[in-house]
Image: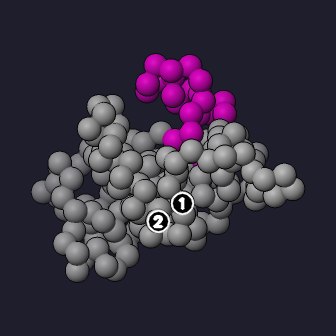
């Protein structure tokens, strides 16, 4: 299933080529550099290199894709489409991610998180799906969530699964 790199290999970041497509009217988006850093942090625990396409979309496109591929007629934060390439070809293509900008912004606000931290979580989460991780079963969810937490901690981002209290009066969250 998932074969992480050895400790010595994972010490250096993965070489990730990230093709970013911005198909959204939402303007508060992370930079291509941040998106690539977050994807590389997730990939670096498993592979030396990878190619990922990341499309940032509005709610209409997210809802249409979520309905078509998952049978859920509502927008979602991230969709992952792993590449179906035989391993013996040795190609670095990992797959495609589709992230809905409005859903990520809304969830960050609802969860009292910095938008950038939630974006990082969604990129790491989606990339781990491309690598074969899932969270349907409780034991799979625990493995995936622990890995996400470790990767995000390495980026200086708090555990996304810890409950966060409402912000203190007067404290501004980044948008």
Residue 54 placed where, x, y %?
Answer: 51, 53
In the image, taking residue 144 as reference, residue 21 lies left or right, namely right
The residue labelled by disc 1 is 158
Which residue is found at the position 42% from the left and 42% from the top? Answer: 80
- Answer whether labels 2 and 1 touch (C-beta < 8 Å): yes
Quadrant in which the C terminus appears: bottom right
Residue 117 placed where, x, y %?
Answer: 60, 58
Magenta span: 56-78
Specify which label sits upstream in the sequence, 2 or 1.
2
In this rendered view, identify the residue nearer to me: 59 or 157: 157
Residue 54 shows up from this direction: no
Q: Secondary structure at mark 1?
A: loop
The residue labelled by disc 2 is 153
Residue 50 placed where, x, y %?
Answer: 34, 64
Residue 12, placed above or below residue 152: below
In this rendered view, identify the residue nearer to me: 163 or 62: 163
Which residue is found at the position 37% from the left and 76% from the top? Answer: 13
In the image, taking residue 138 as reference, residue 156 lies left or right, namely right
Q: Secondary structure at mark 2?
A: helix
150 within the magenta span: no
Which residue is found at the position 46% from the left and 19% from the top? Answer: 71
Residue 130, placed above or below residue 139: below
69 within the magenta span: yes
In this rendered view, identify the residue nearer to me: 171 or 79: 171
């Amino acid at each position: 299933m998932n074969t992480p790199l050895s400790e010595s290999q994972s010490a250096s970041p993965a070489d990730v080529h990230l093709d970013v497509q911005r198909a959204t009217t939402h303007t508060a988006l992370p930079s291509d550099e941040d998106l690539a850093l977050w994807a590389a942090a997730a990939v670096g625990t498993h592979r030396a290199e990878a190619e990922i396409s990341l499309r940032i979309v509005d709610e209409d496109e997210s809802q249409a894709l979520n309905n078509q591929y998952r049978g859920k007629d509502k927008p979602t934060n991230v969709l992952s489409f792993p590449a179906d390439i035989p391993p013996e070809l040795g190609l670095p293509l990992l797959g495609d991610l589709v992230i809905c900008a409005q859903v990520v912004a809304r969830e960050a606000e609802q969860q009292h998180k910095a938008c950038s931290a939630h974006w990082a979580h969604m990129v790491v989460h989606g990339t781990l799906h491309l690598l074969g991780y899932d969270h349907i079963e409780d034991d799979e969810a625990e493995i995936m969530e622990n890995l996400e937490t470790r990767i995000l901690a390495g980026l200086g981002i708090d555990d996304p699964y810890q409950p966060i209290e409402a912000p203190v009066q007067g404290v501004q969250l980044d948008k």
